[in-house]
Image (tube, helix red, strand yellow):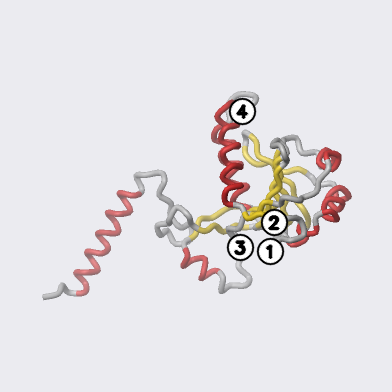
Amino acid sequence: MSAHPEVNQIHVRKWLTAARMLLSQHDVIRHCDICGWFLSVDHAHLIDPASRELLCACPACVAALAEFEDSSLHHISSGVHCLTDFQMTDEQWSALMIPTGFAFFLRSTPSGGVVAMYPGPEGLSESPVRLATWKAVMDSNPMLETLQPDTEALLVHRMSSPHGYYRVPIDRCHALAGLIKKHWRGQSGGSVVHASVARFFTELRNVANVSPRGHYQA
């Protein structure tokens, strides 16, 4: 004899409650910031361009938000591209006045233009972009005009040899900023943070599609 439907619902609710209590004890478990449901390790992210806040999201919420054209939350794609023929001179980089060896550039809807941001021990800092310099960089790299506003960025790594240039989802940039803030020690950051940054870019290259300049495909 099968159980009464209401009894089954009670058992399901009890199981879900117990599961949430058990899983919430582990820091690695994440929940959807929209509906609260459990998320897999490789889950989607949304961003609020106005606040630049990242939200973790389940597939159902991503699909639901896609139905609203005027939603304030934007879905972040997952594609990573290594721009092997990207052109930027040392003079252009110096003119951008970025105080660190890496930064990312995005087209910001709220700001109405390009924004440069770089990670440090206190998190992300914003730097003004000289329009003349950025225009010169864009003239040499037309793919910059196709960056998706608010959700994609040009990530520049000038501390590597050769220099690295990547077209990445904005959540990758936030992940880099997070690990630097987490592991930074002392004045120079310490060996742990340097190893973490090196590992981040190694993993980024391993998952990246190689896209020569002018041949980027979404």
- Which badge, 1 or 2, comes first in the chain's sequence? 2
Q: Quadrant of residue 19?
A: bottom left
Q: Secondary structure at mark 4?
A: loop
Dot 3 or dot 2: first in sequence order is 3
User: Mark 3 falls on what kind of element?
Assistant: strand
User: Does residue 22 lie above or below 151 as drawn?
Assistant: above
Amino acid at pointer 4: Gly
- Give the number of the disc on residue 211: 2
Q: Earlier in the sequence, mark 3 or mark 4?
A: 3
Q: Local crowd at mark 3 within 10 Å, few (<14), some, or many (≥20)?
A: many
Q: Residues within 10 Å of mark 2 (few under 14, many from 20)?
A: some
Please name the residue that numbered disc 4 is placed on: 189
Q: Nearer the viewer, mark 4 or mark 2?
A: 2
Residue 33 seen = yes
| Mark nearer the N terminus (4 vs 2) | 4
The residue located at (78%, 56%) in the rendering is 113
**Secondary element type, mark 2:** loop
Q: Looking at numbered disc 1 in the image, what kind of residue is underneath it?
A: Gln
Q: Residue at x 46, y 58 (%)?
A: 32
Which mark is drawn over residue 74? 3
Do callouts 1 and 4 mark residues in contact (Cβ within 8 Å)? no
Marks 3 and 4 sit apart, C-alpha to C-alpha, by 33 Å
Name the residue type under label 3.
Answer: His
> Residue at (77%, 39%) from the top-left corner?
98
Q: Are marks 1 and 2 in contact (CB under 8 Å)?
A: yes
Label 4 to label 2: alpha-carbon separation? 32 Å
- Can you give x and y, in whole percent of width and height, for residue 184 in the image? 58, 30
Q: Which secondary structure, mark 1? A: loop
Residue at 58%, 41% in the rendered image: 200
Q: Nearer the viewer, residue 20 or 196?
A: 196
- Indicate which disc residue 217 carries: 1
Tell me which numbered mark, 1 or 4, is placed earlier along the sequence: 4
